[in-house]
Image (cartoon, rainbow, N blue to C red):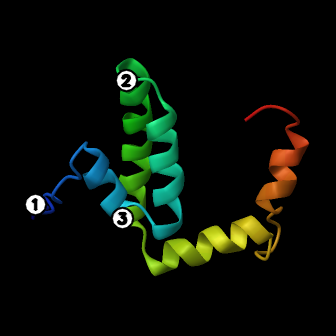
Amino acid sequence: MSVLPRPAVPGIPRTANGIAAALAPGRKGPFLEELLAAQAGDEQLAVMDRWHLRAVADTRRTDADRERAASLRTGERGGVAPLEAVLGSLGGAR
């Protein structure tokens, strides 16, 4: 028995409007601020590329993903350190 491929998910346009529409509500403002602050050309393209990836992740996130992310962030899962503690232990590395 062969596995049928999943239907393709329509892509998010790599435009400011397309990315902003796909982002979680709390991320739209920071995206637009960063985009407006970037210089035209390569700098703006880099901002668009970075935020496009975040928009794709936001559109594919499920309620289960949100619950897991929240438990990792707060360290509420057994044996899991809070995300802020892990980042703090890395010092300046990000």
Q: Tag 2's secondary structure?
A: loop
Q: Name which residue type carries label 3.
A: Arg
Which three-letter amino acid code belongs to the residue tagged 2?
Ala
The residue to which callout 1 is attached is 2
Residue 26 in the image, given as x and y percentages of width and height: 53, 66
- 73 or 14: which is nearer to us? 14
Number of other residues with Cα within 10 Å of mark 2, as a class: few under 14, some 14 to 19, many 20 or more: few
Rendering coords of residue 4 (x, y %): 10, 62
- In the rendered view, tell whether residue 60 sits above or below residue 86: below
Q: Residue at x 80, y 69 (%)?
A: 75
Question: Dots 2 and 1: beta carbons under 8 Å?
Answer: no
Query: Which quadrant is home to the C terminus?
Result: top right
Q: Earlier in the sequence, mark 1 or mark 3?
A: 1
Quarter of image, res 35? top left
Q: Which residue is mark 3?
A: 60
Horizontally, residue 65 falls left or right of residue 5, namely right
**Res 3 quadrant in image:** bottom left
Location of residue 16 in the rendering, given as x and y in whole percent from the top left corner: 31, 46
In the rendered view, tell whether residue 53 sits above or below residue 76. above
In what quadrant of the picture does the N terminus appear? Answer: bottom left
The secondary structure type at the circle numbered 1 is loop
Task: Identify the residue at image location x=43%, y=44%.
Answer: 51
Residue 40, numbered label? 2
Crowdedness of circle 1 by 10 Å Cα count: few (<14), some, many (20+)? few
Picture quadrant of residue 92: top right
Comparing marks 2 and 1, which lies closer to the viewer?
2
